[in-house]
């Protein structure tokens, strides 16, 4: 029998018992008197209460005690004592057993509904997927089920249709609403070569795209997987709670026995009132609010942030965010747009560009793209390349048309020296926040190329918000000190650590950690060690799979404001967990002495019915407090 | 007289509770049966997990068949934190959960409220 049905049964059957209880002071009684009460309560015990007793007995055999143990012992005591009292013509309290069972089941019905709705939210995300897709097969467009789409398929999307899987546009253009996956409310323009995300909505254009990820590999499927993992994880604080819960129930039973002994053997109270105190203690102590305090808050918090395109991996991350005092940013692609452009060329423009483009054609560095774009623009022809060699953090060397050539930063220069004139020009360009590379041929320096990457519009705002929240902000970059400083001045970041080799980023994070816990924000493959080393690694969305794997928080959008939102939401969720634990503990710890009759002299007592109501309320208030996380205002949203 | 009797019984009861719940009690581990297509083990969910410790061999696809007899809402969910598994167990039905045995180690599992605990040990 489901919890809901058990609740409905006990509610209906306990109504006559309640009526009887309220009519008693006026001298009325339901037909059959005590005997009807006995029969009705017996029915409730058998139908609705049996589950508690079964679980309690089964856990008892495992040397475990839990909330069912308390409910079972509490109601059984009240019930059995009343049977004994009835046979001896003394006062009974059947209604206590009946009402307590009804109220506790009520609490569980609410709890169950809320738990299911919280965890169901993630699965709903998967339902956003398109059911069918129009695919090019054997030269014809055919409609097939989503599951049959494979990587490499060419798909057509018409206006108003959902995009089936992740891919890259091959033909046409359109505006796409990606809010369901990235949380970005503005539709984005997409053209040939742009990536599209499965399950997002195409608005006005028709286009063709090539599937790059299908099934469990799509961004949406990975988001769902990640959120599920986060929701079933536990914050470290939970371990303490579990330890307490394990010893809590047996201790409550001992307190209940002591309550009985003190009232009966020492104070000399009647058997009936002694029994009432004891039962109240057992009922009020049910620790179920304690058990749901962390999981419900975690579920709501991670669910809400996922909707905003912020994926928090687990409860440990949430707790770690709370300690963070320093936020370290990678420069390229994190603070800046990550799409650098060539702005100045010093020297013979055609020759410099030709050599540089030849060398960079084999490189994967972001700056290489800028140089190649410029070369394309100027229609510079390809040249023959041999012995290509990338020197980490410095540049590249190769043979171009049989002559040794290089392009890279000042660190690459060993034998050749910059002339005073070039040095001055370089400094000038760097002060303008431009990265300068040196191009050399046959051991001579033939020119300089200046490349500029502008900060994202959101960077300055986000950094200001972090500073306002009391964070120390640091920029960590492989770029030259002057360029880094120029960018830093634009976005008003506190500190700059420049000229860092990719492999040394993690070491710099360690050094910063000696002062205070650090969050690192980055996106590149070379950021992975730093993301793992930092107390909280925040991977930017445009980033690589490796960066996403190493980050504790993943931002789907490429917006620095999300860093601020992620930190704020994590803190809010963790604070909510602490608040929930407080509420759960306060009910139990304040309730027990009152129930035991410690304040009897002040006229403050707690009947078993009130204790049962308090129990249900404590679970309800914890669940409600977690759900309120969905509604709390964010300073940045 | 009965007051003294009550006090004596109470002391005995408290002693029993302390011994029963806080004393050391050994639990038995059960090793999964290995068949041609994988390994599987049955776990009965009733006031806890029996057996509470399951031993699996590394590298062989494994299934744990949960059968929940218990009616309590607490045990209706089973959570394997490290695997990211969080599933509802239908009452009085077998519900199989596949376990990734590629890495040796100890993996805890628990009910939705983390009050009942079990452990999967993957041995090489």
Image (cartoon, rainbow, N blue to C red):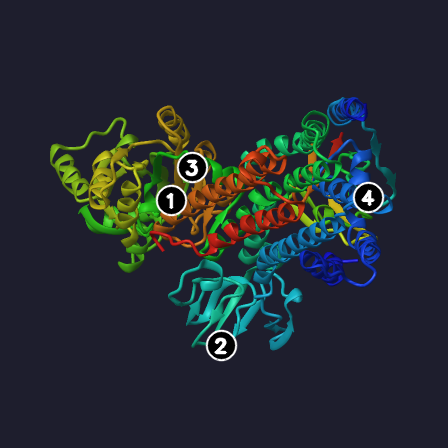
From the top left corner, tell me how far across and down residue A600 is, in percent. 58, 36
Mark 2–mark 1 Cα distance, whole angstroms, equals 38 Å
Q: In what element is the residue under mark 1? A: loop
Mark 4–mark 3 Cα distance, whole angstroms, equals 56 Å
Along the polypeptide, which appears first: circle 2 or circle 4? 4
Judge depth for marks 1 and 4 and give the one in front.
4
Judge depth for marks 2 and 4 and give the one in front.
4
Quarter holding the N terminus of chain B?
Answer: top right
From the top left corner, tell me how far across and down residue A433 is, in percent. 21, 44
Residue located beneath label 1 in the image: A365
Along the polypeptide, which appears first: circle 3 or circle 1? 3
From the top left corner, tell me how far across and down residue A479 is, in percent. 29, 37
Q: In what element is the residue under mark 3? A: loop
Depth order, front residue of A603/A612: A603
Q: Which residue is painted at 61% across and 78% down in the image? A: A140
Query: Mark 4 packing: few (<14 Cα in 10 Å), some, or many (20+)?
Result: some
Along the polypeptide, which appears first: circle 1 or circle 4? 4
Depth order, front residue of A226/A41: A41
Residue A430's image quarter? top left
Identify the subunit bearing mark 3: A
Depth order, front residue of A235/A176: A235
Q: Are marks 3 and 2 on the same chain?
A: yes
Specify whether B13 is left or right of A551.
right
Quarter holding the C terminus of chain B?
Answer: top right
Identify the subunit bearing mark 1: A
Residue located beneath label 4 in the image: A85
Judge depth for marks 3 and 1 and give the one in front.
3
Residue located beneath label 2 in the image: A160
Judge depth for marks 4 and 3 and give the one in front.
4
Q: Which residue is painted at 73% across and 24% down in the image? A: B22
């Amino acid at each position: 029998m489901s919890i809901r049905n058990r609740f409905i049964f006990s509610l209906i059957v306990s109504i006559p018992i309640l009526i009887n209880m309220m009519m008693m002071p006026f001298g009325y009684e339901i037909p059959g008197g005590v005997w009807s009460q006995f029969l009705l309560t017996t029915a409730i015990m058998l139908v609705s209460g049996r589950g508690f007793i079964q679980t309690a007995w089964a856990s008892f055999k495992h040397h475990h005690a839990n909330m069912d143990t308390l409910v079972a012992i509490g109601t059984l005591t009240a019930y059995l004592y009343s049977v004994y009292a009835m046979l001896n013509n003394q006062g009974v309290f059947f209604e206590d057993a009946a009402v307590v069972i009804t109220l506790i089941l009520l609490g569980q019905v609410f709890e169950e509904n809320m738990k299911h709705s919280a965890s169901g939210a993630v699965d709903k995300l998967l339902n956003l997927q398109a059911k069918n897709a129009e695919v090019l097969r054997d030269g014809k467009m055919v409609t097939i089920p989503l599951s049959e789409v494979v990587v490499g398929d060419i798909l057509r999307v018409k206006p108003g249709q959902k995009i089936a899987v992740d891919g890259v546009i091959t033909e046409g253009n359109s505006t796409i609403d990606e809010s369901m996956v990235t949380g970005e409310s503005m539709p984005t323009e997409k053209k040939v070569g742009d990536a599209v995300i499965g399950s997002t909505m195409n608005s006005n254009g028709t286009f063709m795209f090539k599937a790059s990820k299908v099934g469990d590999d799509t961004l949406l499927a990975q988001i769902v997987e990640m959120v599920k993992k986060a929701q079933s994880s536990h914050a470290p604080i939970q371990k303490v709670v579990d330890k307490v819960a394990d010893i809590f129930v047996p201790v409550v039973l001992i307190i209940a026995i002591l309550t009985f002994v003190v009232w009966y053997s020492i104070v000399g109270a009647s058997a009936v009132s002694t029994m009432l105190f004891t039962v109240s203690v057992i009922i009020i102590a049910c620790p179920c609010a304690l058990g749901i305090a962390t999981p419900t808050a975690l579920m709501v918090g991670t669910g809400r942030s996922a909707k905003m395109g912020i994926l928090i991996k687990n409860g440990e991350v949430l707790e770690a965010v709370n300690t963070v005092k320093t936020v370290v940013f990678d420069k390229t692609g994190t603070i800046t747009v990550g799409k650098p452009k060539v702005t100045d060329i010093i020297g013979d423009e055609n020759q410099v560009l030709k050599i540089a483009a030849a060398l960079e054609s084999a490189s994967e560095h972001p700056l290489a793209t800028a140089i190649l774009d410029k070369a394309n623009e100027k229609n510079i022809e390809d040249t023959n390349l041999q012995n290509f060699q990338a020197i980490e953090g410095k540049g590249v060397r190769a043979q171009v048309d049989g002559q040794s050539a290089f392009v890279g930063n000042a660190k690459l220069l060993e034998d050749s020296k910059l002339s005073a004139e070039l040095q001055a020009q370089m400094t000038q360009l760097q002060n303008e926040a431009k990265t300068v590379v040196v191009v050399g041929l046959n051991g001579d320096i033939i020119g300089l190329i200046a490349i500029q990457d502008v900060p994202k519009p959101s960077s300055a705002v986000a950094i200001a918000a972090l500073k306002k929240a009391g964070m120390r902000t640091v920029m960590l970059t492989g770029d030259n000190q002057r360029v880094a400083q120029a960018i830093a001045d634009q976005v008003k970041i506190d500190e700059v650590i420049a000229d860092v080799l990719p492999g040394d980023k993690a070491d710099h994070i360690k050094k910063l950690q000696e002062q205070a816990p650090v969050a690192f924000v980055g996106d590149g493959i070379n950021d992975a060690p730093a993301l793992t080393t930092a107390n909280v690694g925040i991977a930017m969305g445009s980033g690589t799979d490796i960066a996403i794997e190493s980050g504790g928080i993943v931002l789907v959008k490429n917006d620095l404001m999300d860093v601020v939102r992620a930190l704020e939401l994590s803190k809010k969720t963790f604070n909510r967990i602490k608040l929930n634990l407080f509420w759960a503990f306060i009910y139990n710890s304040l309730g027990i002495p009152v129930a035991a009759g410690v304040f009897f002299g002040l006229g403050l007592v707690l009947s078993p019915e009130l204790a049962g109501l308090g129990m249900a309320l404590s679970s309800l208030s914890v669940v409600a407090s977690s759900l309120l996380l969905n509604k709390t205002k964010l300073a940045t949203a | 007289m009965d007051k003294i009797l009550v006090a004596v019984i109470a002391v005995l009861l408290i002693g029993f509770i302390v011994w029963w719940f806080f004393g050391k009690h050994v639990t038995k581990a059960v090793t999964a049966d290995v068949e041609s297509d994988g390994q599987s083990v049955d776990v009965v969910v009733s006031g806890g997990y029996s057996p509470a410790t399951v031993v699996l061999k590394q590298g062989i696809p494994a299934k744990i068949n949960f059968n929940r007899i218990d009616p309590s809402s607490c045990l209706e969910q089973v959570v394997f934190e490290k695997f990211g598994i969080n599933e509802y167990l239908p009452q009085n039905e077998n519900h199989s959960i596949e376990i990734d045995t590629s890495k040796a180690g100890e993996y805890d599992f628990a009910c939705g409220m983390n009050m009942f605990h079990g452990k999967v040990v993957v041995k090489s």
